Structures are given as C-alpha cells and as structure tokens.
Amino acid sequence: MLYNAKDVAKYVLRKCTEHDSPISNLQLQKILYFLQRDFLQTTGRPLFRDEIEAWQFGPVVPTVYYEYCSYGANPIVKFLDSYASLLSADVRKIVDPVIEDKRKKYPWDLVDEAHKPGGAWAYIYANGNGNHRVIPIDLIREKG
C-alpha cells in the first residue's frame, strides 16, 4: 500500500510525542526522508506517494512542510488522533526502528546526515542549482 505523506507524518509525530520526544518540522522532514529511503531500500517500493524536494537544509516533503511550518523550530504538539491504524503492522516493523533512531538525534545532525556527499540530496541540490527540485525515487533508493 502506498501512503499519503501527511498520514505518515501524523504517525511519526504521535509516536515521538508519546515517547516524550516531540520533534520540530525540520526533524520531521528528515525523518520522512529517511523513512522513504529505508522503505525503498528494504521493500523496493516507496512508503508514500508525495514528492521529496531538495531544499537548502535538506530533503523536504512540501505538502507536509506547509502543514506544520507555523511551528517554526518548536516541537509540533498539534493534537493528533490515534496513529496505530494509520500504517499497517508490516510497515510499522520497518519504520518504527528508523523513527526510534532518528528522533533521538539533534536536528542539525539529521541535516548533516541527509547532506552526505554523493547522496541523493547533494546530487540534486548541486550547491543550490537544484533548490526545490524533486529528488527522484530511484535516486533516493540508489544513493540514499
């Protein structure tokens, strides 16, 4: 099943909040990227259908970014309905370890990880020449 990125984001936000580590929009964007990357590399298919773009501070899912940008750098604490039913149990087995690992990292450490030389973001962003360009799914799968 191919999900909507907003539903995946709600799952991530609720899970982080319930584990007493609410995250910012910057962290959410990077976690969504790593979820898409790891899901692609594990299953061969994307987790969500929304496009990811190369922005200055790393990969961004615009549909989700604009949903939560009013929080700025603050933790997103918007009331969220139960998240358990948003993703299937098989999908949760893949995404939960990624969320658990990434939610503990500092936002700028996530940015650095997403900016790795030779990675998909760096390839598309190209020192700013590719700002706001879509990072193709195949490139995310291949270069991470």
Image: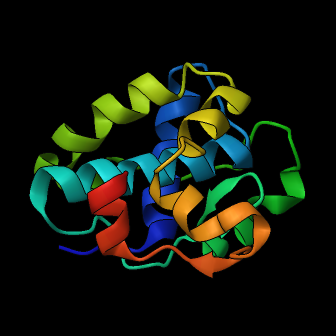
Q: Can residue 55 be seen in this view?
A: no
At x 49% / y 78%, what residue is drawn? 51
Q: Foreground: 73 or 125?
A: 125
Please name whichever residue, 26 or 6, is drawn nearer the observer in this view of the structure.
Answer: 26
**Residue positioned 70% across, 31% down in the render:** 107
Q: Where is residue 141 in the image (x, y as percent from the top left)?
A: 28, 60
Q: Residue at x 14, y 50 (%)?
A: 42
Q: Position of residue 16 (x, y in %)?
A: 53, 31
* In this picture, residue 53 sits left or right of residue 75: left
Q: Where is residue 103 in the image (x, y as percent from the top left)?
A: 53, 27
Along the horizontal axis of the image, is 78 left or right of 135? right
User: In terms of depth relative to the viewer, which is nearer, 41 or 39?
Assistant: 41
Give the image quarter of residue 93: top left
Q: Is residue 13 above or below residue 104?
A: below
| Residue 89 location (% of width, % of height) | 14, 47
Would residue 65 be visible to someone looking at this image? yes
- Residue in the picture at 37% in, 49% down: 35
Which quarter of the figure is the N terminus placed in? bottom left
Above or below: residue 102 compared with residue 122: above
Q: How many labels does the image show?
A: 0
Q: In this view, does 24 lie above or below 69?
A: above
Question: Observer-nearest residue: 127 or 95?
Answer: 127
Relative horizontal placement of residue 120, taking residue 76 as reference (left or right): left
User: Along the horizontal axis of the image, is 32 left or right of 144?
Assistant: right
Q: In this view, does 85 lie above or below 126?
A: above
